[in-house]
Image (spheres, helix red, strand yellow):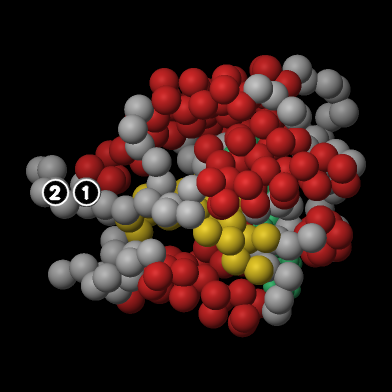
Amino acid sequence: MKNEKQGKFITLEGIEGVGKTSNLRFIKELLESSGHDCVVTREPGGTNLGEALRGLLLSHSDENMSADAELLMMFAARAEHLSKVILPAIDNGQTVLCDRFTEATYAYQGGGRRLDVDKISELEDWVQGDLRPNLTIILDAPVEVGRARASSRSEPDRIEKEQDDFFQRVRKAYIELAEHYPDRICLVDASKELAEVQHQIHERLGEYDILTTID
Ligand code: T5A
């Protein structure tokens, strides 16, 4: 049976290594303590097809992929994710918490790859219709901070192999998104220690009225 109340859609963004994965569980716990029934998912990915596309997109190979092919694969994965996971959960009154979404496309393919933002916007409208996240939290930190944190892990994937100037453009595009859409996108200073970052996240969730208790 369809729930009368639509669930919320919350996304977490930022350059590599800023702490998205580290903070997802924290956000989920905050939401659940306010009565949200959460679905945690990620992009690219979240479905069988999406995860297969993720494997191709992030493969460790150095082979060049055209920027347009990369953009279209991001949206192909997103179309599948919306139809199989995100929209059914929202319609069911669940809160979807997604590690990256379309703001990543604006930042990486628009900012990083310098693709035409109007093309991204057309794909966004086509694939999502009117759907936009209720809140996007961008974890912001200097590129060298993210790099240093991410380097403690596995071998860099195809996108992580990009140079610092690519990630500077990605970061700049994220900051501009927060400036353009302050009603639904906010920044958190992720260069601070984890407890302080989580304090800021908690504050933002309150400010954007996400933690209103659900009966
Ligand atoms: N992509 C994605 C596009 O190009 N276009 C798109 O449309 C979409 C959807 C996905 C890739 O795909 C691209 C972007 C990406 O390149 P991913 O796995 O989602 O890849 O993204 P990554 O950025 O690679 O994820 P990471 O795992 O690298 O980064 P996280 O999740 O931000 O960082 P996390 O939590 O793993 O933390 C890294 C390390 O830092 C420590 C953690 O303990 C960990 O060791 N840490 C801190 N240390 C000190 N202080 C803090 N505040 C800390 N927070 C975390």
Q: Quadrant of residue 198?
A: bottom right
Name the side, left or right, on which 190 lies relative to 13: right
Q: Quadrant of residue 91?
A: top left
Would residue 143 be visible to someone looking at this image? yes
Q: Which residue is mark 1?
A: 6
Q: Secondary structure at mark 2?
A: loop
Depth-wise, is mark 2 or mark 1 nearer the camera?
A: 1
Would residue 21 be visible to someone looking at this image? no
Q: Residue type at mark 1?
A: Gln
Q: Secondary structure at mark 1?
A: loop
Q: Give x and y (percent) for residue 109.
A: 68, 31
Alpha carbon distance from label 2 to label 1: 7 Å
Q: Give x and y (percent) for residue 171.
A: 72, 49
Q: Which residue is mark 2?
A: 3
Q: Give x and y (percent) for residue 152.
A: 84, 63
Residue name at image x 33 percent, y 76 percent: 33
Q: Quadrant of residue 130?
A: top left
Residue name at image x 61 percent, y 41 percent: 104
Considering the image in quadrants, where does the C terminus appear? bottom left
The relative height of residue 154 versus residue 112 in the rendered view (above or below) is: below
Considering the image in quadrants, where does the N terminus appear? top left
> Which of these two is toward me, 43 or 59?
43
Name the side, left or right, on which 66 lies relative to 86: right
Does label 2 point to a residue whose CB lies under 8 Å from ligand 1? Answer: no
Residue name at image x 46 percent, y 75 percent: 203
Do the residues under discs 2 and 1 have CB atoms within 8 angstroms? yes
Name the side, left or right, on which 210 lies relative to 35: right
Q: Residue type at mark 2?
A: Asn
The relative height of residue 189 versus residue 125 in the rendered view (above or below) is: below
Residue name at image x 80 percent, y 47 percent: 168
| Ligand 1 image-quadrant field | bottom right
